[in-house]
Amino acid sequence: MLGQILINGVFLGGILASMAVGFSILWRVMGVVNVAHPVFCLLSSYIALTLLKNYGVDPLLSLALILPIYFALGCFIYVIFIQKLGGKDITSASMVLTFGLMLIVEKLIQATWGATEKSFLDVSYLMATLEWGGIFFSGDYTIGFILSILSLASVQIFLTRTFTGKAIRAAWQDIVASLLCGIDFNRISAITMGVSFALCAVGGICMTFVYSFYPSVHLNWLFYMFLITIVGGVGSIKGVLAAGVIIGLLVNLVNLLVPYQWITVIIFILLVGILLYKPTGLFQS
């Protein structure tokens, strides 16, 4: 039983990390705290479910279709909204702006799809189970985890092996020096936001492979995104993954000892302790 809980905790942690990584990178590069990030994760799930129900499009294929749309959406939101915040306290201003955006998208979701819970229970391979060594690997957790790890690996390769990725890293290390080197900060910021949105589409769909979803569930996700980003260190991909796994394991282990409604309280106490011990995060480089 303990082995099963640990495996599920690691898999859940990987999925949580894929949801939080775009949020973390955007915060590090631009100082933008996008509190609308989880509601866009949720929107991608509703779109994928609609394509499945109405047109028979497999969720994995839907994800491939949604990714470029979300990238373009992120670039658009940067140009129309975030770029206008330049010269102000962008962290506070972005929180206010994206909070309003979050409310708009949530109401749009509720008006379009209703308030009832949805799920991907009709997808056969998500309901499949493989038993190995006394541990059961369910399709929803396994596929969600694999996609999440692939997304994290892809963004790590992008940031370390491509010219644009290196420019993004240069911008988050020293904006002034990157400008002196000829890096177009507005272009880099637009790409960063596009990548952040594409990552949130992956994380959102993977999360809803595992759990049912409804219009306000993104508020729970927002709590975990902040927690993982702070524990892992803002902008640290490896830190986000490590923090996600820690949180995933804690959620599953604590659930053995206390009622589910106490999990958030206990994890919040953990967050306070970490902030007191190391405000920059456990894995911040």
Image (tube, rainbow, N blue to C red):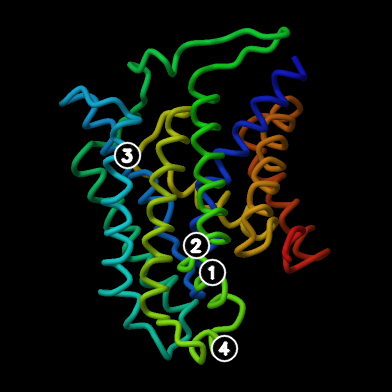
- Give the SS element for disc 4: helix
The residue labelled by disc 4 is 177
Residue type marked 4: Ala
The circle on residue 162 is: 2
In the depicted view, which residue is nearer to us: 171 or 123?
A: 171
Mark pair 1, 3: CA separation = 25 Å
Mark pair 4, 3: CA separation = 36 Å
Residue type marked 2: Thr
Q: Residue at x 39, y 86 (%)?
A: 86
Q: Is residue 193 above or below residue 67?
A: below
The circle on residue 166 is: 1
Q: Residue at x 19, y 41 (%)?
A: 112
Image marks 4 and 3: residues in contact by CB distance under 8 Å: no
Question: Which residue of the protein is positioned furthest toward the left in this rendering?
Answer: 54
Mark pair 2, 3: CA separation = 22 Å
Q: Earlier in the sequence, mark 2 or mark 3?
A: 3
How far from the left and from the top, in percent, is residue 137?
A: 59, 16
Mark pair 4, 2: CA separation = 19 Å
Image marks 2 and 1: residues in contact by CB distance under 8 Å: yes
Q: Is residue 87 above or below residue 23?
A: below
How far from the left and from the top, in percent, is residue 59?
A: 32, 29
The residue labelled by disc 3 is 64
Q: Earlier in the sequence, mark 4 or mark 3?
A: 3
